[in-house]
Amino acid sequence: MPADMFHLGWFYSKGFGPKAWKHRWAGSSVDRFTKPDMAVHLAQAMERSGFDYIMLEDSSNVPYTYQGSHDAYLRHSVDTPKLDPTVLAPFLTAATDNLGVVVTCSTTEYHPFMLARKFNTLDHVSDGRIGWNVVTGSNDGGAQNYGRDRQYPHDERYDMADEFMDVCHGLWNGWDDDALVLDLEGGVFADGSKVHPIEHVGKYYRVRGPLSSPPSPQRSPVICQAGGSERGRRFAGQWAETIICAARGVEAMKSYRSDVRAEAVAAGRDPDSIKVLFLISPIIDESFETAEARRRHRWDTAEHEVDFGLAALSRSTGIDFSKFDLDEPIPPLETNGHQSSARQMEGKILRDVLRYNRTLETVPLTGTAQSVAGDMDELMQEVGGDGFLLVESYHSRRYIAEICDGLVPELQKRGLTRKSYEFNSFRENLLSF
């Protein structure tokens, strides 16, 4: 593969829920948001374009942080409703042959054995194309659905996640490669001497093992993570194989990638075994002028839909933004939620945050397919790697076509992204360059 090639993924923001909400191109996608149609359409378009993976975001509560009520969240469909992404994933792998499918599951909402078994099964039925986006929970509303008053403290959640990962990998590696015999004539299905309990007794978990199913094609799912805090970066450096990065601006992007790679080296890992993908929300049109008009419309919509924006900020941070003045700087924020997101907002005028920072994109990209492809090339050369993760929370089928059938062919012409898949498994394709 050429040295300057980079990877592409899609962050399926807002999870298995409504897309194209209040969008002129919404079509039937709103009425059928509980069905896999939209996600299947996207997955098939992504595979035609050579994407590495789709990442299914998730959270498991109806938020209520903003104004102490869930009313705004339900009225505007802000991060809710969401169906279970582990049920959506098999529809996507059945409709594709090569695309990786990453599913979000929280270490504070699952038990390690249950999660290890679920992902082992998903990897089996997908022939080795499953990944796990490891999250630790951030919103107290989610904790309250699982019997706790609030989330565990931020850094302790990562301590728990470290042990959780040890247990899962122990379970995934509990069967030797040749443990499954399948000798019909000899009457031996599996060799019990080659299947091993893990007998784990730790601070947070106690698991005997072994896993009740044989090794899957990848043995373990590809591990995805999005830690932005200092503790989160350390966790990502130790465990992640691909990372979601929302650092804003070129210098922040370079710094983040450098920090994570240093954490990987400190953990005894090859830093090239981690692919950092930067979130972008490109706006593509026939001319720069029409694309720029669409971006201004996006900003204007964000400013006018104040309740929507404030509710979204409140959910991610666990802080009620209704108590802040729209035209005053945001004060220092104390949060047990997404700390890196909160830090980025401090000192900025709240109205400006709603207008310009509502999306997760690291840099704004606007123009024709040709010009944006050129911008992505220059940006990746400056940052150093490893690729981009598309994010457009309320995308339509039109947006999918603009990216997969407009932008990506321009990237392929430049030799920047793959035209076909070299390997069968998700991990092999991710690590192929």
Image: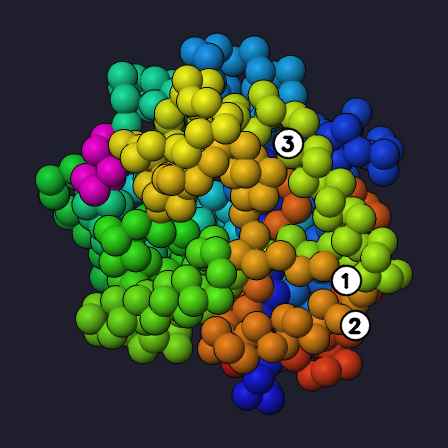
Examine the structure image and report whether residue 82 is included in the region drawn in magenta: no
Spot occupied by residue 2 in the image (x, y as percentages of width and height): 60, 89
Q: Quadrant of the N terminus?
A: bottom right
Tell me the kind of residue under disc 3.
Glu
Question: Could you tell me which secondary element the residue under label 3 belongs to?
Answer: helix
* Alpha-carbon span between mark 1 and mark 3: 22 Å
Residues at badges 1 and 2 in contact (C-beta under 8 Å)? yes
The numbered dot on residue 70 is: none
Mark 2 = which residue?
Answer: 370
Which residue range is magenta in the image? 152-157
Tell me the kind of residue under disc 1.
Gly
Neighbours of disc 2 within 10 Å: few (<14), some (14-19), many (20+): some
The numbered dot on residue 367 is: 1
Question: Could you tell me which secondary element the residue under label 2 belongs to?
Answer: helix
Q: Where is 171 relative to 276, above or below? A: above
Q: Where is 234 relative to 306, above or below? A: below
Disc 3 versus disc 2: nearer the observer: 3
Looking at the image, which residue is at 57% across and 84% down? 4
Looking at the image, which residue is at 77% across and 81% down? 413
Q: Is 178 left, or right, of 8 in this rendering?
A: left
Neighbours of disc 3 within 10 Å: few (<14), some (14-19), many (20+): some
Mark 3 = which residue?
Answer: 303
State the residue in front, 132 or 385: 385
Tell me the kind of residue under disc 2.
Gln
Looking at the image, which residue is at 43% across and 67% down? 251
State the residue in front, 179 or 38: 38
Write down the quadrant of residue 39 in the picture.
top right
State the residue in front, 392 or 112: 392
* Alpha-carbon span between mark 3 and mark 2: 30 Å
Spot occupied by residue 118 in the image (x, y as percentages of width and height): 44, 43
